[in-house]
Amino acid sequence: MEEIKAILKREDIAAFIVIHTPGHSEYLNHLETSYSCAKIQFDQVRLKLKSSEVGRERAKEIAKDTLNMVTHIAKATGQNSLFYMDCSKLLKDKFGGEDLPGEETSHSQQNN
């Protein structure tokens, strides 16, 4: 996850990422880009934008770009969530599978 995080920072890209191994998954909400006023703190989104610090026009642009980012991530994760839930049900129904015990942590939980 650290390598993925470094790429996201270097390329100035926002993302929601899940990595998985049997029995464990880790996810990362990375919203801190140069065009975003969003920041994840303690698994909550914080929005901080002061036009007095960046100027009125730049603040409007950052707010617009942050909304666009959050909207796209919400749509993509929502649509894919439904896909994975359907796939999970199909696997359980068709193969009688059981979900393995395991844990799920956020990247910020891992590194606090």
Image (spheres, grey):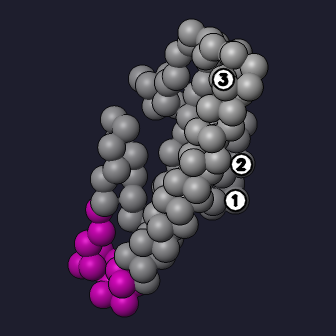
Reply above or below: 67 against 41: below
Residue 111 shows in this picture? no
Q: Secondary structure at mark 3?
A: helix
Question: Which disc, if any, is residue 11?
Answer: 1
Q: Which structural element holds mark 2?
A: helix
The answer to whether residue 74 is seen in the rendering is yes
**Looking at the picture, does residue 41 appear above or below residue 52?**
above
- 94 sits to left or right of 9: right
The residue that mark 3 highlights is: 92
Vertical order, 36 against 25 (above or below)? below
- Which residue is at 47% across, 67% downward? 71
Amino acid type, mark 2: Ile
The span picked out in magenta is 48-60
Q: CA distance from mark 1 to mark 3?
A: 39 Å
Residue type pointed to by label 3: Lys
The reply to whether dot 2 and dot 1 touch (C-beta < 8 Å) is: yes
Do the numbered discs 1 and 3 sit on residues whose CB atoms are within 8 Å?
A: no
The structure residue drawn at horizontal position 37% and vertical position 90%, both measured from the top left corner, is 57
Q: Quadrant of the N terminus?
A: top right
| Residue extending furthest toward the bottom | 57
Can residue 58 be found in the magenta stretch?
yes
- Residue 7 circle label: 2
- Looking at the picture, tell me which residue is in the foreground, 101 or 91: 91
Q: Give left or right: position of 72 versus 21.
A: left
Q: Which mark is in front, 3 or 2? A: 3
Q: Position of residue 73 (x, y in %)?
A: 54, 59
Q: Quadrant of residue 44?
A: top left
